[in-house]
Amino acid sequence: MIYSSSRGWLAGVRARQLLILKKRLESVAASKSLAPQDKCELMIGKIDPLEAAEVVQNKKFVLSPQLHAQLRACFISQDKLGQIRQIALKSRNKWRRIQAMISLGASGDLQAIQVLARGLSDQDEDVVYFAMLALGQIKNAQSAKLLLEFLGKRVYSGYKIVSLLEDFPDLIVPQVIAVTQSGDPFVRFWCLKLLAKFKPAAYLEMITQLTQDSSADVRSAACECLGETGQPAAKEVLLVCIKDEAWFVRMRAVRALAKILKHEALPLITPLLKDPDLLVRESVKNALSLNH
Amino acid sequence: MRTDNIPYIIFAAFFSYFIILNVYYVILTIIALFESRKRRLESAAEDYQRLLVSAFTLPVSFVIPAHNEEDWVVDTVKSVLNQEYPEFEVIVVNDCSADKTFQVLDEFLKLEPVEKNYADRFTCGELSGIFASRTHPQVTILNKTNGCKKAAAVNAALNLAKFKYICLIDADTVLEPDALIKVMAQVQKDPDKIIGAGGYFGLVNGFTIRDGRVLKKNFLQQPLIAYQNVEYIRSLAVHRIAWSKYNAMPLVAGGFSVWRRDILLDLGGYSSEFSSEDLEFTLRAHDYIIEKKKDGYRILMLPYLVGWTEGPGNLKSFIIQRDRWQRVTNEAVWKYRHMILRPSHKAIAFLTLPYFLFYEVLGVFVEMAALALAIGGAVSGLIDFRVFLAYLVFMILCNAVISLTALFIFVRDQAVLKTREIAYFILLIFLEFFWYRWLMTMAKLSGTINYLRGVRSFDKYQRQQR
């Protein structure tokens, strides 16, 4: 009861503090007598770096665009990010380190990548996990490279890592294509799943080669990826895949053909209505109903 | 041995039992204190928004078996449809309902018969029809008219479920909108290893619900319901969280459980041979995976409030429910007795199952014997009345400390209870020993007797009027 009451009271105090802080920030920003450097010092100089990051990221309350821009400039000039990087590296409180990593990710700080890379090889699984999430927020080639390397370590699932990479800019596609040559079928599979999101028509030949992969999972992902590219040139290779020994490769190939060729695929896939596997037959039925 | 020492030896035996049990609880409580906090911080830092829009978030098949659930089933389905989750399907099995379960579903979902490839892998009884919703395309209704049992109903839905993970919920459970995303965010970290997961739920009795959403929570209910909430808190916030840390979770409760579909299929689905399914299935899953020598599998209990379920609102219903729970405990412990203290089964063999055997199964005899001996001893003068009283106070305080710590963990990590509700629960905790505990013991005794008589039915208690 005491805990609950005190928590409610603390929440109230915190809300009031934030309101006071907001008013102070507004009055300092509006002041004409202060030099910009002094304004920065007064605005966020003495605030805890993680709290300052929260304010700058507009997490607790909405700031006007002008004030937000001013605060952001102060945040950089006061090297708050440098302080946060130090917290992420050195704090003894694990959850403070994690909070710092999340802040670094949200700020898109390019220098933070080295810090987060170290987080990926930390002993503590929570630190590793949140370093990975933070890297997923810095959407550039360097963080993509780290995440693709991390995929091969199999610390977290392909689902999780690929979901971080799916909204990266297209510039990472060549990197992902390069990793499809990995010796690990798990990595090849997830790279193809990721590539399907980017629909990389320019790399049709490399993806086509993976339909001959020794791993059935990789072959099926390659068929899915070809289907997403929507290139009619993939027709011939997909016609080979509908005869694959693995049912899920046949299923993906049927879906891909239907996606690329629309109603023209129907005569090609109709024989698979006699496929021994139920799900392959279901895929053909779905294709027939969608394209009729 | 001198005969006048016998009462002391008996007293020492009971006292040792009590002390061992309480030391066990204290250890679990300490583990839960840290584990629950870790999970809360983990959840606070998780990026749920990303999961909500990702094409790689694992889709889930909801399975809802419904037998005579006309009062609840629509709210349950609505609460599932309200889930903030990118992709899921819902399969409701109308399991031989004699009431208007199908009609209310039809009214809400605008059902029409459909033809689907349905192959019965579990011999779970014939279907009289498969229906799809015109308004909610992700919902399918299976109508069952024979082979009526919850396990068979769940298995029928498994025949049709298409996604990698299955979320089983009861037809009287109302989910929180973020229930699935919170649980699946953890599952998605390692779907190759995480085969099952569960979350917290409490009693919905007395809540205001509209369109599958809880509008007003009220925990200031009659003592029977409030005590069940306290018991849920103790069990979920302490025992299961601590067991889960060491992968020794014996029970992912049927009210809300997420299972990987391949495990459900490999194990032949739920079993109809038991009075209830969840405990038996969880133990079977542990046993199966360990026997297959698959290392690193996980069954998780996550301290996130996922939903609210209806609990028995009167003594008769309460006894019926707890009688069944006791029967299934006895059935499962007996069936999986080979796992107890077996080194290959690790924590579940040493941390959980011995507790189930000595407390959940045999505890009822110990408690009844202790009560009879204590009262008999005090009345006959064999036990000094002051010793009896001191022992009683000690027991109450031990029980209270453990329950209060569980309540503290719950209040700390879940912003649900108001101050006056916490005060009410604290008061109830101190009074629990005087009636609720003995009510549970009586229900357990009834369940044990029925188990020995061979009763294996799924006795459903009377629903409260809404």
Image (cartoon, coloured by chain):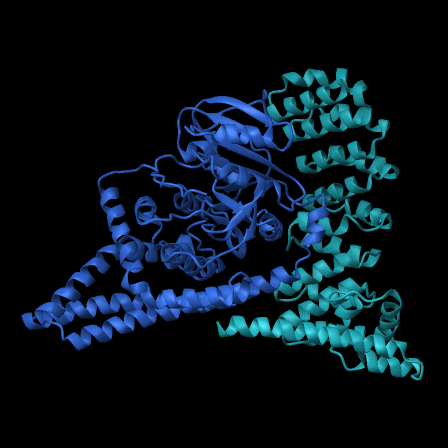
Chain colours: A cyan, B blue
Q: How many marks?
A: 0
- Camera-side residue: A109 or B308? B308
Vertical arrangement, residue B294 with respect to residue B96, above or below = below
Q: Which residue occupies the foreground of this view, A158 or B420? A: B420
The location of residue B148, given as percent across then percent down, is 40, 29
Which residue corresponds to the image point at 45% horizontal and 32% vertical from the top-left?
B153
Q: Where is residue A145 drawn, in percent x and y?
A: 79, 55
Residue A197 shows up from this direction: yes
Q: Position of residue B88 (x, y in %)?
A: 62, 39
Q: Is residue A118 left or right of residue B351?
A: right
Q: Is residue B28 visible?
A: no
Q: Quadrant of the N terminus of chain B?
A: bottom left
Question: Foreground residue, B58 or B64?
Answer: B64
Res. A15 image quadrant: bottom right
Q: Could you tell me which residue is drawn at 54 percent across and 64 percent down?
A: B413
Q: Is residue A255 above or below residue B334?
A: above
Residue B34: x %, y % from top left: 51, 68
Depth check: B220 or B3 in front?
B220
Task: Name the side, left or right, on which B232 lies relative to A228.
Answer: left
Name above or below for residue B51 compared with residue B116.
Answer: below
